[in-house]
Amino acid sequence: MSVFLVVIVFLGYFIGYYYNNSNILYFAIIFSLFMNILSYWYSDKIVLGMSGAKEALHDEYIDLYHLVENLSITAGLPMPKIYVINDASPNAFATGRDKEHAVIAVTTGLLAILNKSELEGVVAHELSHIGNRDILLSTVVVVLVGMVSILANIFMRGGFGKNRDREEGGANGLLMLIGVIFVILSPLVSQLIQLAISRKREFLADASGALLTRYPDGLASALKKISEVNIPMKNANNATAHLFISNPFGSTAKSISSLFSTHPPIEERIKALVGMKM
């Protein structure tokens, strides 16, 4: 998060200097703060709406309710709200600004293929995201990545008017070149940082979830079943992909494209879980 804030301030400063307009820096800082506040209070509603999730009725999903309730008590967490997504793709995610306002959402496809111990593993994984405060971190990171991309895009389109380099006859050409290269590469660097954070938090949630259930094989078996189905979600979205327990676009091929996946390979996660000793 500190790196992102430094990047945004630098981008705002450079673009403001390049176009000889100090207001751009103030705009970058104020807008990023506004977006953080907005995402903090409404991130869960935005994510649930984008995913097509509906609040689960207790009488219809009574077994799921009891399972979540028991694991929440074990984890020492408040009972989160439970949502269900009508989608054949087996998946789940957690969202919310803190443990008192948390939500766990699961797909109907997940409920259809997992047995009790496997479902416990998945729910424990999501509860671990809540307990580890990953749900807030993930949202803030998404907002900051978006902010970097917006600033870079506006700069590349020349949306701020005449630049200082033209006015000063190219005297600052080297500085301008370095700044332009930074602006071009910053969205890619931001995305890679986002993916690195997401992958590390997935491994941590796997381990924490296994410790919560005391049965790592349950989550390992669930991940194996999820990977074997490999059905992309109907409402898969790049902005929310990292929130899910498994890539909502389906498994990626083992190529250079896997570098940009929001999730570590399922095989590596299963291997780590199987190697845990309770």
Image (cartoon, rainbow, N blue to C red):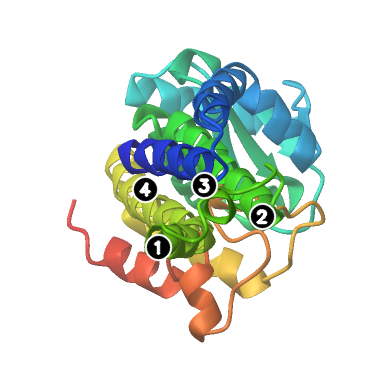
Give the labeled residue for mark 3: 18
Amino acid carrying label 1: it is: Ile
Distance between the Cα atoms at labels 2 and 4? 18 Å
Amino acid carrying label 3: it is: Tyr
**Of callouts 4 and 3, the N-terminal one:** 3
Amino acid carrying label 2: it is: Asn
Give the labeled residue for mark 2: 238
Distance between the Cα atoms at labels 4 and 3? 37 Å
- The crowding category of the residue bearing disc 4, from other C-alpha atoms within 10 Å (few below 14, some 14 to 19, many at least 20), is many
**Of callouts 3 and 2, the N-terminal one:** 3
Amino acid carrying label 4: it is: Arg
Residue beneath the point at 58% across and 19% down = 34
Q: Mark 4 vs mark 1: give the one in front.
A: 1
Q: Secondary structure at mark 1?
A: helix
- The crowding category of the residue bearing disc 2, from other C-alpha atoms within 10 Å (few below 14, some 14 to 19, many at least 20), is few
Q: Is residue 240 visible?
A: no
Q: Is 263 left or right of 115, judged from the image as shown?
A: left
